[in-house]
Image: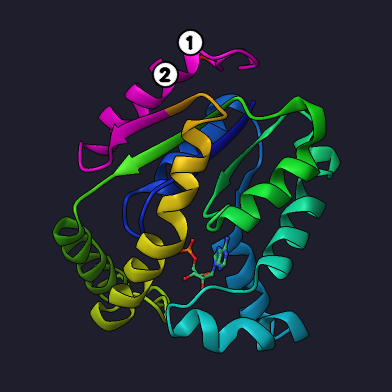
Amino acid sequence: MRLILMGPPGSGKGTQAKRICERFRVPHLSTGDILRAEVKAMTPLGSAVAATMEAGGLVSDGTVSAIVASRIAGTDARNGFVLDGFPRTVSQALALDHALGEGGLTAVIELKASEEALYDRICRRAVESARAGEPQRADDNADTLKRRLRAYRAETLPVTAFYKQRSPFFQVDGLLAPGEVTDQILQLLRGCDGVGTVKKY
Ligand code: AMP
């Protein structure tokens, strides 16, 4: 199964991607997580992207596309993957097409949510992780969220238009309860070609 989960920051992509990956036993490829790990490990790549990420901007297409191309070619991704946070630009979508070759995508699912609700969620996520003593994301604050949403509107919404014309494309209300969102995604995937067997709990 080769799935792309799209949606603005705070729409629940990470939570849903984890659940879907567990069900289908495929890797969760989150470019945000991969880049945050590079920043944390203070690698040359991490140092190069840290300021952009903290400011809520987009890392260069070439950098993220190369990361994804190498991850989807890995042996752990031979039965598929769930991409979370990639592609975020049409140029990245074209690079992914090239990297995927003939097989194409099983589906693209967009989680929809109003910007007002996203502000609430992100601010709550910041407060809850601070309360739990967890490390806070440097970009989980109202100012940066504004920039991330602007980037989403300008760069990533055109990607949804791109996929609507080429791949099985679905939209799910990201503001529903997380379990409900998962159920709807699984239901949609049942109707798609190339979906492996769903693991029973
Ligand atoms: P995320 O965890 O997906 O919200 O990503 C956090 C940050 O990582 C984004 O605000 C960007 O700075 C960077 N990033 C993650 N994925 C991409 C991507 N596909 N293209 C460009 N920048 C990205």
Residue under label 2, please give it.
188
Q: Is residue 99 left or right of residue 29?
A: right
Q: Is residue 38 visible?
A: yes
**Which residues are the magenta region?**
170-199
How far, Cα to Cα, is label 1 from label 2?
Answer: 6 Å
Give the amino acid type for the residue marked by disc 2 in the picture: Leu
Tag 1: amino acid: Gly
In front of the other: 180 or 31: 31
The local secondary structure at tag 2 comes to helix
Res 62 → quadrant: bottom right
Residue situated in front as seen by the camera: 16 or 155:
155
Q: Is residue 126 above or below residue 109?
A: below
In the displayed structure, does residue 72 sit left or right of residue 170?
right
Q: Is residue 120 left or right of residue 37?
A: left
Q: Which residue is mark 1?
A: 191
Contact, mark 1 vs mark 2 (Cβ under 8 Å): yes
Is residue 201 something that shows in the picture? no
Q: Quadrant of the N terminus?
A: top right
Picture quadrant where residue 181 is located: top left
Q: Is residue 193 magenta?
A: yes
